[in-house]
Image (cartoon, rainbow, N blue to C red):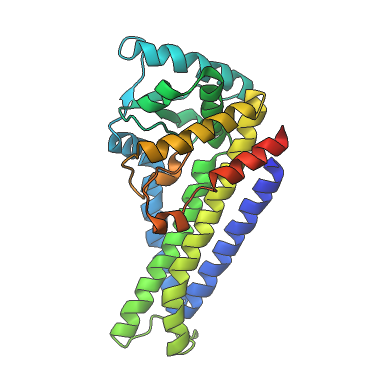
Amino acid sequence: MTTLNGVKTALLLGVLSAFLLLAGQMIGGRSGLQVALFMAVLMNFASYFFSEKIALAMYSAQPVTPSENPHIYGRVAPVVHNLCQRMGLPVPKLWVIPDPSPNAFATGRNPEHAAIAVTRGLIDVLERLELEAVIAHELSHVKNRDILTSSIAATIAAAITYLAQIGHFAMLFGGRSRDDDDNALGGAATGLLMLIVAPIAAMLIQMAISRTREFAADGTAAKYSGTPQGLISALRKLEAYSKRIPMEASPATAHMFIIQPFTGSAFMKLFSTHPPTEERIARLSALA
């Protein structure tokens, strides 16, 4: 399953890249493509290297140490150390988010600069086997370098969005961003269509990549925790509690959590970065 998910991710990134080239040629020509790609790389480069600090600060996360959070440290640290030995990973920094809604996420640009954050609600509601499965899922994101994959996808998607904005301004002011030997717009109708379709298509492909990586992390977690049952039980609890105790999460970081923070919005459900929980459970059950 992990290999299949890797192939699917590579294909989706390929489609996203091809769509970027197509959109760039149609909306802004080669010059517009270069400008959009430069802006997107610059923005996501900063995000990649500083995402850990940004995400932890956003949720008022506190470091988990034996002196400051002995109860949480006693529950979480042994699980993390044990799993890191099995998975061949350096031990990440541990953080706790003072929120009653049970959830968790991993961040950091590589295994050597990783962090695992759990909410207080997660510690309160999960049993040992469930907690181990959730931590294994987050460590799987670190092991599979999903943060890097997400950064690449975000860079390409952002470049496509910038291209659409370039095309929008070009149409407003009657100019065309192009090289002398290129046709930037294949007609007004085609250009207008691309302005609308390009950002939406990029977002949908980016979400498909995110969902694929969630499935992959689930499978890896089941492997290293020894059974899929712990994660199945944890996902059921987290899904139920996320509705009973909604978490205030930024749309920009909601994709990082093991389960999408519940908002009640039909729009957010339609454009969810997470697969349906029942589908995740069904795939894990098949492993059993």
The reply, left or right, for residue 85 in relation to residue 248 is right
Counting every numbered tag in the picture gives 0
- The residue lying toward the viewer, choosing from 279 and 169, is 279
Q: Nearer the viewer, residue 15 or 35?
A: 15
Q: Which quadrant would the N terminus be assigned to in this image? A: top right
At which x and y percent is residue 11?
Answer: 64, 57
Query: As displayed, is residue 189 above or below residue 67?
Result: below
Q: Position of residue 60 (x, y in %)?
A: 27, 32
Q: Quadrant of residue 95?
A: top left
Residue 105 seen in render: no
Residue at the image position 34 percent from the left and 84 percent from the top: 171
Q: In this view, does 251 lie to the left or right of 12?
A: left
- Which residue is painted at 45% across and 31% down in the image? 114
Q: Can residue 49 be seen in this view?
A: yes
x and y percentages locating residue 131 in the rendered image: 51, 23
Residue 219 in the figure: left or right of residue 135: right
Up-down: is 149 above or below 200? above
Quadrant placement of the C terminus: top right
Relative to 253, is 154 above or below? below
Q: In this view, does 199 lie above or below 133?
A: below
Q: Residue at x 42, y 34 (%)?
A: 241
Position of residue 45 measured from the top left corner of the image (x, y, whole percent): 40, 49
Q: Residue at x 46, y 73 (%)?
A: 197
Nearer-the-camera pick, 249 or 14 = 249
